Amino acid sequence: MKSQYDKKPIPVGEQINLLESKGMEFYDRAFASHILSIIGYYRFSGYAYPFRNEVDHSGFVDDTSFEKVYSIYEFDRSLKSLLFSYLGRIEIAFRTLIIDKFSVGTDTALWYTDAGNFINKEECEEFLGNLQYDIEDSREDFIQHFRDTYSDEFPPAWIALQIVSFGALIKLFRNFNNKDLQLQVAKNFGCDSVDRFISWMNTLVYLRNICSHHARLWNRPLKKRPEAYNFGIRNKRWSQQDLAKLYYSICVIGSLLKGILPGNTFKQQLASLFKDYPYVNSTKSKFLGFPKDWQTEFAW
């Protein structure tokens, strides 16, 4: 039987006392008070959760300090910023390649309005309905210019698809019925399977949403798991547990970037980030799924 939530709000000073009573160490209580006042006890507690005593969960294990937990929070914040930047590069390349390949391949700028180009006609109609609303609601100068200048109901793909969300763009791509053109887009990312490429892109949307909403990424099992691929790793077999760890999705990002941005510094930036946070670096295998030799384990 479910119980009713009855916990009362408590001020920051009492939050610190509560954490301390559970065994958390504080080297600078004024600093801790400031941090909790700007990020919140509840958000902070998500990073402290793995340090609970495994016997009764009533307190923290030895050597659990506020500063250590906060360093994990800061690492996570920096990691999300790094990922968000590169996910943006992937999204823009994906958007551009769909527009170019599908427009040239179908020899029309309005291929996305033709239900004959799609597997699911109802999904196509739903997409157009949502797009029409977005066009009418848009304050983008290029959309306004088109509406003021032309009488057409929909703009060409290179205008219209600029205001479509990443997730909606993937649905449009998945529903497209020309596998050859889909494969052309995937191969530009170095991926030779349309189905695997779609799986990967869906995971990237999921990751992008975590980053953009500032949710915790560290030590988070990923619900949207990408299709497995060995990335050239000899005899590597990925379990479902492996796929739920962040490391495999990092592999996906690295692989896709290699296709569109050869010579990128994603790996180096990631390695530098780990170097800046020694505790996270020492526990990256346990909490993030990174092996010790991650920089050489697969072809970046």
Image (cartoon, rainbow, N blue to C red):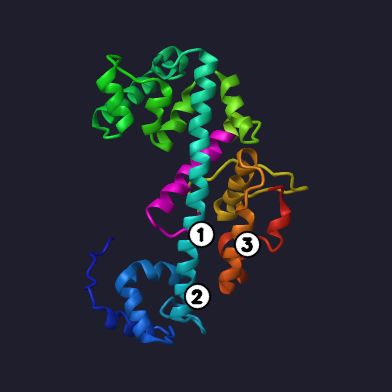
Q: What SS does tag 3 mark? A: helix
The answer to whether residue 216 is magenta is yes
Q: Quadrant of the N terminus?
A: bottom left
Q: Nearer the viewer, residue 121 or 5?
A: 121
- Of 45 and 257, nearer the camera is 257
SS at mark 2 in the image: loop
User: Who comes first in sequence, dot 3 or dot 2?
Assistant: 2
Say which quarter of the image contains residue 134: top left
Q: Please name the residue that numbered disc 3 is placed on.
A: 271
Residue drawn at x 59%, y 40% is 227
Is residue 291 left or right of 141 when viewed as pictured?
A: right
Residue type at numbered disc 2: Glu
Q: Position of residue 212 (x, y in %)?
A: 40, 51
Residue at 37% of width from left, 26% of height from top?
Answer: 160
Seen in the picture, residue 24 relative to 139 is either above or below; the reply is below
Magenta-drawn stretch contains 246: no
For residue 261, side relative to residue 131 (left or right): right
Residue depicted at x 43% and y 87%: 27
Q: Residue at x 33, y 24 (%)?
A: 126
In the rendered view, does 199 fall on the left or right side of 131? right
Q: Is residue 89 visible?
A: yes
Q: Is residue 177 visible?
A: no
Query: Where's residue 14, x and y in %?
Result: 27, 82
Mark 3 residue type: Ala
| Disc on the earlier residue, 1 or 2 | 2
Q: Which residues are magenta?
A: 197-221
Mark 3 crowdedness (10 Å alpha carbons): few <14, some 14-19, many ≥20: some
* Above or below, 13 relative to 158: below
Give the overall secondary structure of the magenta segment. Answer: helix
Q: Which residue is mark 1?
A: 79
